[in-house]
Image (cartoon, rainbow, N blue to C red):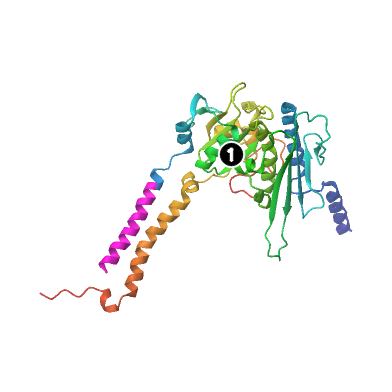
Amino acid sequence: MIRALLLALALALAAAVPAQAGILPEGDAAELAQALAEAQEEQDVCYGWNVRNNFAPTADVGSSVGGPGAITLTSSPSCRKGYAVLEGSIDYACSSCEAEDSASVSISSNLPDPPTVKDLEDLGLKAGDLTGDKDDTTLVNMVEALPLLVADRGNAPYVAYEQAPASDVPPADHATDSPGSDVLRDSWVWLVLCVALILAGPGFYLYKRAQMPKSQQTSPPSPAT
Amino acid sequence: MKRHAILAIALAGAGVLGLIFTIASHSSVREDIAKTYRKVGTEPPPGGEGEGRKRTQIYASNKSVSKTAKEIADKHKPADRRAAESGVFLRYKEDVVAVVPPPAGAKGSRILVDDEKGGYHRNFFFVGGFWGTYSGPAGSFRGGGPGAGK
């Protein structure tokens, strides 16, 4: 009886939790659509995203006009200056396959000088990261960068930067996870090379010593006085 | 044998010298920005002044926001970065660099260099939850940090 009740409870909970379409949970998609709607208000440009995948029944879709789950920008009268949509595709390879996970993105737009995938890459946003651990943050960054790139290319004014007032930052909130050494991040190749040289010195000496005949490895005893 | 010993010492010596030079010649992102861009002001650090806090340094660039951010990130690889609708935010060990649009009517971009606490406070609307804790309405992508996975 108890087992049946627990099963019913689990099924009810599963039904209550909205199904996640792709890599972006519903709450994050709503937040992203809201950020785009605010950008649209300042720029008169509509934004959206449509990222298909091979692991969920539906795609990650949303826009500044219709919110999460809707993308009807081409016909919307509110997109006075135009639109820019991040289109993408994520393809996870099966665990037994030889092929690797892959992803690709493109930007569809009717703006005179639309942002490009190269612009996203210049910001450090690579399509391949959509198959990584931080796929959701990569998608959010890519989509949120669209209004910035649209302004950079002179299609619309920049969305004004707003500094957070001190009252809006909860005192308990703070940065976490150490970013690690800047020197290591910038110069790790040189540092590895130098350490390799340091190790190569004694290594080379010991190798050459081992190659020599035993009689030459030790210096002859000094003559007795 | 002596020749081999000299060669071994030379190799190790070159490594030690290279190590010293690499570490000694490394400049921080804060120093490089100060050398490269035009300084337009300073501000008290967000989150309150105190021991060890650094004042916010403000610079102007005549390049666009994304070009300026790329220029800085190419020279100094950030531990984490965030691209948003009104700026690009770069995180380093001790500094947070925000490249944001210029004041109304101006061209180019503005660069704000804060210490870690100041940068997190100033750019909380953009980096809050991505680089640390966030008490606002949370989404699951908030809560990362350098090297943090899902």
Q: From this viewpoint, is residue B116 visible?
A: no
Secondary structure state at the residue bearing disc 1: loop
> Does the magenta portion include A139?
no
- Is B20 within the magenta? yes
Tag 1: residue type?
A: Ala
- As drawn, which residue projects farthest toward the left? A225
Question: Which residue was labeled with disc 1?
Answer: A175
A207 sits to left or right of A78: left
**Quarter-wise, where is residue B91 in the image?**
top right
Q: Chain of mark 1?
A: A
Residue B140, position as x, y percentages in the image: 71, 44
Against A136, residue B43 (above or below) is: above
Locate residue B102, reporting x and y percent.
59, 26
Q: Local crowd at mark 1 within 10 Å, few (<14), some, or many (≥20)?
A: many
In magenta, the rendered stretch is B1-21
Q: Main secondary structure of the magenta part?
A: helix
Quarter placement of the N terminus of chain B: bottom left
